[in-house]
Image (spheres, rainbow, N blue to C red):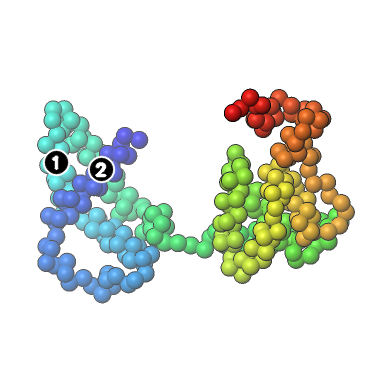
């Protein structure tokens, strides 16, 4: 890890000294048309890293970079200067080899967020088709309508995207984002489904009710009656009164977390 940090610092220094001394600034004004900004951030980023890869393959420039950074090491006090030079000689060639020969410019630009992709939407769409076929094949308990299929898919997706420690706030936040993760052709249908959600539906999702049960609850899926969920897993039920808390075995929980002490002012 320490070596990686030093390698990154080397490239900061590289920009500050080596490249400045290696080129005539006036010459940079005459940039070839192929390297001028295109307005496409992804394309510009890719071209920049392609240019860097070409530059770093130049032995003369590599020597200038090494000399420039080692000169900075000379300004460090005591043994730190020698340690700096040792790390430069060990790590800089590896870093140059990575940029010049291993890293792919397009992939680097994706990693730093300048080249987007439709992978997320494509995966979501593929997942939708897969789930739709599975639901249709298991239609013994459900009438496999388009609305039901989409609802089941949406609830399964919500469950997959929820953090491990799911909370109502996390679920509400995800509900505000999920329709914009889906392809735009499904956005209206997604918003229609979410528009049917109530506090009871949120509690059911957080209590791990099955997607089919949730969609039956909001009347988008029909068929044999599907048990929604054990009511004692619902926070609004298990602590609603003393009798229910005793029935669900949650009296201590309710006294500690749900019910306000009578002596609270």
Name the residue nearer the viewer: 185 or 129: 185
From this view, report whether residue 14 is shown above or below residue 31.
Answer: above
Instruction: Quickly name the residue at label 1.
Output: 72
Q: Quadrant of residue 137?
A: bottom right
Q: Residue at x 35, y 35 (%)?
A: 1
Per the model, the C-alpha gap separating discs 2 and 1 is 12 Å
Left or right: residue 111 versus residue 91 is right
Residue located at (58% from left, 46% from top): 170
Query: In the image, residue 246 lies at what x, y percent?
Result: 79, 27
Q: Element at badge 1?
A: helix
Apparent side of residue 120 relative to residue 14 in the rendered image (left or right)? right
| Viewport quadrant of the C terminus | top right
Which residue is under mark 2? 9
Where residue 213 appears, x then y in whole percent?
Answer: 78, 50
Q: Position of residue 78 (x, y in %)?
A: 13, 27
Residue 102 rendering spot, x and y as whole percentages? 36, 52
Please tell me in which quadrant of the rendered image residue 175 appears: bottom right
14, 147: nearer the viewer: 147
Let me know if residue 139 appears in the view: no
Q: Secondary structure at mark 2?
A: helix
Mark 1 or mark 2, which is nearer the start of the sequence? 2
Q: Residues within 10 Å of mark 2 (few under 14, many from 20)?
A: few
């Amino acid at each position: 890890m320490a070596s990686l940090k030093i390698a990154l610092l080397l490239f900061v220094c590289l920009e500050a000294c080596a490249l400045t001394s290696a080129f005539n600034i006036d010459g940079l004004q005459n940039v070839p048309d192929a390297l001028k900004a295109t307005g496409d951030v992804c394309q510009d980023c890719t071209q920049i890293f392609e240019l860097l890869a070409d530059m770093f393959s130049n032995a003369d420039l590599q020597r200038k970079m090494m000399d420039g950074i080692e000169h900075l090491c000379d300004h460090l006090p005591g043994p730190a200067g020698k340690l700096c030079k040792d790390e430069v000689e060990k790590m800089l060639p590896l870093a140059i080899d990575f940029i010049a020969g291993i890293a792919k410019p397009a992939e680097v630009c994706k990693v730093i967020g300048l080249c987007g992709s439709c992978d997320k939407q494509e995966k979501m769409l593929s997942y939708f088709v897969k789930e739709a076929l599975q639901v249709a094949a298991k239609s013994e308990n459900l009438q496999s309508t388009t609305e039901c299929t989409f609802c089941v898919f949406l609830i399964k997706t919500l469950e997959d995207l929820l953090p491990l420690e799911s909370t109502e706030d996390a679920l509400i936040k995800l509900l505000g984002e999920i329709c914009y993760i889906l392809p735009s052709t499904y956005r209206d249908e997604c918003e229609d489904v979410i528009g049917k959600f109530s506090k009871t539906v949120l509690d059911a999702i957080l209590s791990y009710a099955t997607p089919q049960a949730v969609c039956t609850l909001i009347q988008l899926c029909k068929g044999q009656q599907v048990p929604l969920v054990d009511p004692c897993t619902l926070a609004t039920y298990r602590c609603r009164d003393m009798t229910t808390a005793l029935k669900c075995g949650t009296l201590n929980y309710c006294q500690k977390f749900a019910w306000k002490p009578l002596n609270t002012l």
